[in-house]
Image: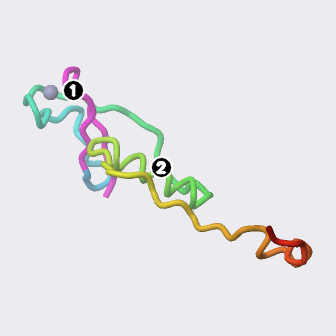
Amino acid sequence: MVVYVYRCSEHGVTEQSRPIGTATAAVPCPTCGSPAPRVFTAPRLSLGDPTRGALLDRAERSRDAPEVVSAPPPRPRRRSPTLTDPKLRRLPRP
Ligand SMILES: [Zn+2]
């Protein structure tokens, strides 16, 4: 299956998953029903870096339905350098 991209002049991009070679020149826009012509995009082949791929996938998922958060992510717990560094452990404490 391949994702083909179509663009309505009023409602933007829509995607359709079809077998290779079965793309039509236009599809009806899912919102208004007017013909949305096909848009040719670069094929999404392997991007090499999996971190970059995950970032692109996340951006793609949040394009139509952004993730909503109610609070910032929790801060990572950091240990004080005075507890982890043996040289600083010997210093006098207040
Ligand atoms: Zn439309």
The question of residue 8 being in magenta is answered with: yes
Residue named by callout 1: 8
The structure residue drawn at horizontal position 20% and vertical position 27%, both measured from the top left corner, is 11
- In the rendered view of the protein, which quadrant contains the C terminus? bottom right
The structure residue drawn at horizontal position 42% and vertical position 46%, both measured from the top left corner, is 59
Q: Is residue 12 above or below residue 71?
A: above
Disc 2 to disc 1, C-alpha distance: 23 Å
Q: Residues within 10 Å of mark 2 (few under 14, many from 20)?
A: few
Q: Quadrant of ligand 1?
A: top left
Residue 61 percent location from the top left of the image = 34, 50
Residue 68 percent location from the top left of the image = 30, 48
65 relative position to 72: left or right: left
Q: Is mark 1 within 8 Å of ligand 1?
A: yes
Residue named by callout 2: 56
Q: Tell me which segment is drawn in magenta.
A: 1-16
84 relative position to 38: left or right: right
Q: Secondary structure at mark 1?
A: strand
Contact between marks 2 and 1 (CB within 8 A): the answer is: no
Q: Amino acid at mark 1?
A: Cys
22 or 60, nearer to the observer: 60
The structure residue drawn at horizontal position 57% and vertical position 58%, both measured from the top left corner, is 51
Q: Is residue 53 above or below residue 40?
A: below
Residue 89 percent location from the top left of the image = 85, 76
Q: Earlier in the sequence, mark 2 or mark 1?
A: 1
Q: Amino acid at mark 2?
A: Leu
70 relative position to 90: left or right: left
Q: How is the model colour-coded?
A: rainbow
Residue 28 percent location from the top left of the image = 12, 34
